[in-house]
Image (spheres, coloured by chain):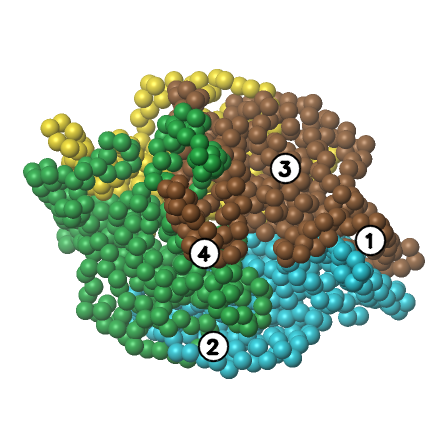
Chain colours: A brown, B yellow, C green, D cyan
Amino acid sequence: MTLTPEQKAVILKQINSTSETRRATVPRMEEHLYKAYEVLDHGFVRAIDYMGDDNAIVQAARVSYGQGTKKSRDDAGLIRYLMRHWHSTPFEMCEIKLHIKLPVFVARQWIRHRTANVNEYSARYSILDREFYIPKEDQLASQSQHNHQGRGDLLKGREAEKVLEILKSDSMRAYDNYESMLSQKNQEGLARELARMNLPMNIYTQWYWKTNLHNLFHFLRLRAESHAQYEIRVYADEILKIVADWVPAAFAAFTDYRLDGVQLSGKGLDCIKRMLAGEDVDAKNSHMSAGEWKEFQALIS
Amino acid sequence: MTLTPEQKAVILKQINSTSETRRATVPRMEEHLYKAYEVLDHGFVRAIDYMGDDNAIVQAARVSYGQGTKKSRDDAGLIRYLMRHWHSTPFEMCEIKLHIKLPVFVARQWIRHRTANVNEYSARYSILDREFYIPKEDQLASQSQHNHQGRGDLLKGREAEKVLEILKSDSMRAYDNYESMLSQKNQEGLARELARMNLPMNIYTQWYWKTNLHNLFHFLRLRAESHAQYEIRVYADEILKIVADWVPAAFAAFTDYRLDGVQLSGKGLDCIKRMLAGEDVDAKNSHMSAGEWKEFQALIS
Amino acid sequence: MTLTPEQKAVILKQINSTSETRRATVPRMEEHLYKAYEVLDHGFVRAIDYMGDDNAIVQAARVSYGQGTKKSRDDAGLIRYLMRHWHSTPFEMCEIKLHIKLPVFVARQWIRHRTANVNEYSARYSILDREFYIPKEDQLASQSQHNHQGRGDLLKGREAEKVLEILKSDSMRAYDNYESMLSQKNQEGLARELARMNLPMNIYTQWYWKTNLHNLFHFLRLRAESHAQYEIRVYADEILKIVADWVPAAFAAFTDYRLDGVQLSGKGLDCIKRMLAGEDVDAKNSHMSAGEWKEFQALIS
Amino acid sequence: MTLTPEQKAVILKQINSTSETRRATVPRMEEHLYKAYEVLDHGFVRAIDYMGDDNAIVQAARVSYGQGTKKSRDDAGLIRYLMRHWHSTPFEMCEIKLHIKLPVFVARQWIRHRTANVNEYSARYSILDREFYIPKEDQLASQSQHNHQGRGDLLKGREAEKVLEILKSDSMRAYDNYESMLSQKNQEGLARELARMNLPMNIYTQWYWKTNLHNLFHFLRLRAESHAQYEIRVYADEILKIVADWVPAAFAAFTDYRLDGVQLSGKGLDCIKRMLAGEDVDAKNSHMSAGEWKEFQALIS
């Protein structure tokens, strides 16, 4: 990560200035505010602001006036109930704002989640920094032979070296040329909105991203999952840690019902019932396709 | 407004408990938190939580690390620029949560603004209170003769009296019958989800409503406007006062460009140019329809 | 259902006029267009328009130019894969527009699904008809003793009669008074936007409702489910029949993975694995709460 | 544009197969369906499907059963009224689906409009083609001296040549290296999801993009506007032509009220009133900032 001394000073100042507020406040979440948690080689996740806490979910579900008189154990039970039965609106009552620095190809995956508010650094208006994502060797994987959109074994030896050389040298050359097209020494200088098109998609961008807890959980379920691309999963993992401190009861319910939970089809449920009744269920009598049966087997073993 | 002593005590407790926070905090907004501002005969608006301030808009527009070093005068100018050019995403970085008590027919208008998070009191689950909106005499207007969805002159004398008698007695009878259908004395008691259908639409409901500043401005532009129905406009007016204290620079820009501003058609702009050039423009040579010309005349006079 | 002869004639005309189109067309869906399928005592569901078919889902998932050369069996497999792995965007490529007539209290539940386009009949602008939902005796249920938002046994004898009398007479009286407040014989006539507040929530309204297939499936999953209120479930059931003819492959996948499928928590999955391994799992060693264990038991039996 | 013979054959087949439908059909829109309208050097816009027509807007606004008996002149007047008063929901009743091929840096701007359904070609799953946007010389503009996100004069002579050389050679080298990293001759072959990061943002991607008419108008207002970047504006311009044939009355209203129309601030309106009354209004007594006054002057001259 490359924070300038000026940026570090700004962040330190943010961390050190506090105010009094009547709003719902979560001390363990306050600890995270403004800090830049490193992700990949130049990226970060920073929590900038939050609204609400576990109690805000309960308060909205009950449309009650205040904090309620119920015990916190009941509240956790209610939150689990809401999660189990897909009552999503109470979770929408919590909101979080993050400042993210991430490679463009990751940003392009991320933005497909449309139910968030986003302000991205503008390369029409400003000049991007010379920062590119170069994978570590332990992430330099080959194309999976089984999964069209997955990774297989790690590349080895000379092939891995060659890939890294390409990524590094193409990044540097593209940036050199970007700068030289922009430069106004003895020339007009190409418009920024045009020059940026020469940059490869491993360059870093950044944005403010704000979303509610329900939509964040949806994002995390898909992106913290093992099939998500590694380079976005590491961001999701970092966000998970923050959420665990922010809304611990909601996080626990989310973990049990979504991250650790599974969706069974009607066919799958039927197979389980038959298996529990002692029947010998196999691919053939499961009425599933080969792919589904394989996924089902993995699920219950 | 009918807050019970218990509710008042809960609100007082909320107002009196403060925490330390690193988050962006607006002292004048803090003053509003939790207070129940009366609207109509039993309704209220309560600000429960907020995220961000004027600076959060600027910070997102610049994707800057901190509060920035720019002068607040420049910030207000930037906010005006963003508003003028419909750059809506920075305004989405501020969020507000309100607790609203309102008649059902108002709630039905309100909910048409879909870009908000809502949790409404459930009459499937709970029993509604005996609280109905009965208009004051100075709001008892006749149907407009000109505008299919507007009000004309006030009703007078006996007719006004009769309307009030009807509204009051039908409300009371409906509620008596609601209660008697629910009652389990010597009977099973009708399911709540069915009994509620007997209640008229002037009964009060309540909800938690959370939205971002951009969508809130859109709501306020349409609902604080003179053509909006009085019974929703009074809620919008109360929210306007809160927003003015929360994000004063954004509010000033919104007032100038949206509330006080107007949309001119190409034809309207052409007429103004011709009028400024000294030409005598009338309904006929304006190329507008009769209705448009009338609205245009009202606009510039 | 009360369609006037004029409305019937309009519908017949719609059914009988056809055009040639290059668009994706589903003959079995064409059969449904414009027809008013009766729901409850005065309501209906009418399919007015649709965009796309099963193939449009596949086409978007593959971002292919045309209909593709793949066999339809492969297409159904792909659709199942998309549904199983929560790839929702291809399902968003199909759109449906419905004309629905429904009681206001049902409309208020329905509108909580915000991701649809809605135009509702305006009682500010027009006068509502004298049509109210009166439940049939086989739906006149008592409040459930176990479920705060559910129904228990049917009301019997005199109690059922009394409820029906109340619902009918309150509806009629409210409508009589609505009319008398509006009436302009020898009086000004109360504004429509005010008079409507006297009407109970079993009065019928109507709207055009347009949504994409992904959001429709979400709606149907929640509203065609056994815990949904009967009065909205009957609408969902009617829509299910239409969807089955419109996009049969997507509908089959939806049925298996969502309607017939279940969500297992991590704890639930763990219990199943232990049970399949022969362990004796009970409420205590399941690590679930009493409520969860009960739901889990119901799931697998 | 580079359509393969196979793609051309598929498109021709789509154009030539028609069905009978009861749905609202627009003959002039049918003419556009499936055709690839060229944009930039390799891009295109293809209309794939549509739902609704001008009448569908009117039908929804009136919540009427059929096509209505009103004259088409009244319908156009109603559509103008809806547009003038920001009644957006009736316009949401029309939907369009487009197949777009566009450079990645344009796609990144485009996707910021979140209220649409999108399925993009996946470079995790598939291999991108060797197609890059290289601007024509008449678009090779320098950075504007006045507008941070705009273009100034055209680059001349050697500088223009140099820029084109860079863009071309960097594109080709990046693609050669992309291929060589993927290639599996005598090597594992890097995972596609990683290799793609080496590609610059002028490479072409494609997607299916579906949106309703209200959101499309919002997109077009911002992107067909003179301040929009040229490379996205040419797509908006092509879409405008299609919309003009699809919903001519709505398009005419949109043109007058949005494209040709302007938003006046309260201050601006006040200045116009004073000017019309004969007052000499200047920058100083306008109460506007220098920037606003300049924009205001441009507006009315």
Residue indicated by mark 3 = A237
Q: Residue at label 2?
A: C22
Q: Is residue A55 above or below residue B201?
A: above
Same subunit: marks 3 and 4: yes
- Which three-letter amino acid code belongs to the residue tagged 1? Glu
Q: Quick check: D251 above or below B168?
A: below
Image point (38%, 27%), residue name: C283
Q: Quadrant of the N terminus of chain C?
A: bottom left
Closer to the camera, D163 or A54? A54
| Callout 4 amino acid | Lys
**Amino acid type, residue under disc 2 in the picture:** Arg
Badge 1: chain ID = A
Nearer to us: label 2 or label 4: 4
Report in which chain the residue with disc 4 lies: A
Q: Position of residue D133 (x, y in %)?
A: 74, 66
User: CA–CA distance between discs 3 and 2?
Assistant: 47 Å
Q: Are marks 4 and 1 in contact (CB under 8 Å)?
A: no
* Mark 3 element type: helix
- Real-space CA distance between mark 4 and mark 1, rounded to the nearest whole angstrom: 43 Å
Of badges 1 and 3, nearer the viewer stands 1
Q: Amino acid at mark 3?
A: Asp
Are the residues under marks 1 and 3 on the same chain?
A: yes
Among the two numbered marks 3 and 4 on one chain, the one whose residue lies closer to the N terminus: 3
Give the residue number, with chain letter if any, for mark 4. Answer: A284
Residue B232 showing in the rendered view: no
Residue at (35, 70) in percent of width and height: C28
Q: Is residue A233 left or right of residue B263?
A: right
